[in-house]
Image (spheres, coloured by chain):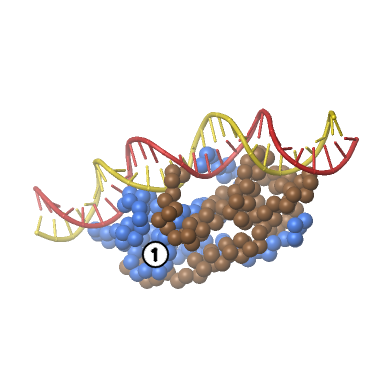
Chain colours: A blue, B brown, C red, D yellow
Amino acid sequence: MGVTKTQVFTDRQNRIADLAKALAHPARIAIIQHLLKEKSCVCGDLVEVLPLAQATVSQHLKELKNIGILHGEINPPRVCYCINETVWQEAKAIFGEIFESEVAPNCCN
Amino acid sequence: MGVTKTQVFTDRQNRIADLAKALAHPARIAIIQHLLKEKSCVCGDLVEVLPLAQATVSQHLKELKNIGILHGEINPPRVCYCINETVWQEAKAIFGEIFESEVAPNCCN
DNA sequence: TATATCTATCGTATTATTGCAATAAGAAAA
DNA sequence: TTTTCTTATTGCAATAATACGATAGATATA
């Protein structure tokens, strides 16, 4: 998306945006929902569940891994993807904090 | 970003992704934080706060308005942007629900 | 060793996003 | 009416994201 001027924003603002970006695709939401609900975390199962090509799923998994939400565990010949509890809690805290805020009264309300 | 295959995902998955996408830029995070904390909601003030050109800020505001998070109130010659409480609560509920989930035990944990 | 299985990466086409200057649009005030 | 103030829109260039076929890599099995 063009060049986001990340350097003019705070680290925290950039981190929030990055975490949100990781969630900003229905396929990645589906992946996370699957890992939250189902016992299976094998890449191949995710490929079967998602109506996308294997290469595309692998790419989405990579993005979630890059941001830290997932980590992969090689279990030959498979790879298991799991939610990283630490980052998951970080995201929970960050979004929780934002949505906890009361909207300041202003000219509109 | 290429063509997201939205039609193969559920409405809810797409809605979550769309809301996340609205938060997926530090400038939009900054806008929301400003509206949450400061009394001012005038477009011009946001332009002063953000280190971006007026046209760029206007564009980010438009995106937040499109998703429903903000609504604009014309107050000639100014425009006040305010958080839409309904959509804000929707987003809070959606992200709250996701992050409430316990991670299902699988081969990794 | 040869084959089969599973996942990652590469290459590429297409579309989306970011950013800004310039300009248009709208309303109030002079 | 003309000017001024504020915000939206347009047009453009540059870069990022999505998707998938093809292929490489790594490991287990025959």
**Residue B32 relative to residue D22: left or right:** right
Residue sitting nearer the eye, A92 or B5:
B5
Residue C19 horizontal side relative to residue C2, left or right: right
Which chain does tag 1 point to?
A
Q: Tell me the amino acid under the disc marked 1.
A: His
Marks counted in the figure total: 1
Work out whether residue B109 or residue B16 is closer to the camera in this orientation and state it.
B16
Label 1 element class: helix
Left/right of residue B21 with respect to residue B45 in the rendered view: left
The residue under label 1 is A34
* Residue A74 visible in the shown view: no
Quadrant in the picture for the C terminus of chain B:
bottom left
What residue lies at 51% left-to-right and 42% top-to-bottom? A1
Which residue lies at the image location 49% right of the left edge and 54% below the top edge?
A24
Q: Nearer the viewer, residue C9 or B73?
A: B73
Residue B68 in percent (x, y) is at 61, 55
| Crowd band around label 1 with a 10 angstrom C-alpha radius: few (<14), some (14–19), many (20+) | some
Q: Is residue A71 left or right of residue B51?
A: left
Tell me if residue B82 can be seen: yes
**Residue A38 in the image: above or below residue B28:** below
Residue drawn 52% across the image and 68% down it: B97
Residue B95 x/y as whole percent: 53, 64
Residue B104 or residue B89, whichever sits in front: B89
Residue A36's place in the image compared with A52, above or below, is: below
Residue under the image location 48 percent in, 57 percent down = B14
Figure quadrant of residue A76? bottom left
Residue B52 spot, x, y in % from top left: 65, 41
